[in-house]
Image (tube, rainbow, N blue to C red):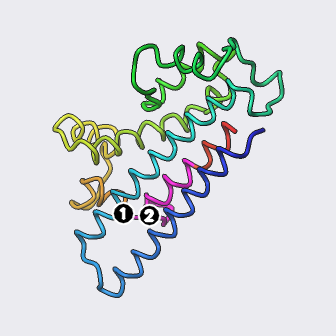
Amino acid sequence: MSTSELSKFEHSLERITYTRQRMENLYQDKRLNETDMDSVYEALFLRAVTSFEAFLEGQFLAILQGRTSYAQRRVRVRMSAVSRDALFSILLQRTKYMQWLPFINTIERANIYLAGGKPFSELDGGQRDMLHRITVIRNAIAHRSDYAMKKFSQDVIGTAALLPREHRPAGFLRGVSMARQKRFEIYISQLGDMARRIS
């Protein structure tokens, strides 16, 4: 099992958590207002999702380049390239970068180059549903389009009885779930669990 990509991702989540806690302290001391906190939560959420995408890419490349150590019966590479440049030429196929989310992009790519798409295909249905909601929230923050906000309302909010401010991404992330945790904290924890499952 490779720990380098996972370690980088977990370190990123630790920094995000630390920053959020510091900002919460400033907010409690009335040194930040609601608008500031909304911006903080949105920016940190985007950073977390971007870091997860970087983890997916880093782990995928590490597997193809033989820089990881999985049990052979678990993860088997279906192709090899003579060089790093050749590998990227094959993977990019005239595009400038690889998209990892929505997660179906990762699964489709993994199924081509890895037997059974493992370890990426090992995320269960609940984790994939969670990752879908995380991606929809990310899109609503990043794009602000009518379509992105409609998807957020349909796929994330659904029929949940929420406060009016929780019908926006920042307010939703800052809101407290039935588990008495901020939803932001739950999503960050889930991203860490998914990365560990893949690793």
Task: Please give the residue where the numbered disc 2 appears in the rendered image.
Answer: 182
Q: Mark 1 and mark 2 in contact (Cβ < 8 Å)?
A: yes
x, y percent for residue 195: 62, 43
x, y percent for residue 89: 52, 16
58 displayed left or right of 179: right
27 displayed left or right of 79: left
Q: Relative to 180, is 26 above or below? A: below
Helix, strand or loop status at disc 2: loop
Q: Residues within 10 Å of mark 1 (few under 14, many from 20)?
A: some
Q: Residues within 10 Å of mark 2 (few under 14, many from 20)?
A: some
64 displayed left or right of 46: right
Task: Please give the residue where the numbered disc 1 appears in the rendered image.
Answer: 175
Mark closer to the chain start, 2 or 1: 1
Location of the N terminus (image quadrant): top right
Identity of the amino acid at label 2?
Lys
User: Distance of mark 2 from mark 1, alpha carbons?
Assistant: 5 Å
x, y percent for residue 188: 51, 54
Q: Relative to 24, is 9 above or below? A: above
What residue appears at the point 66 percent right and 14 percent down from the top-left corner? 81
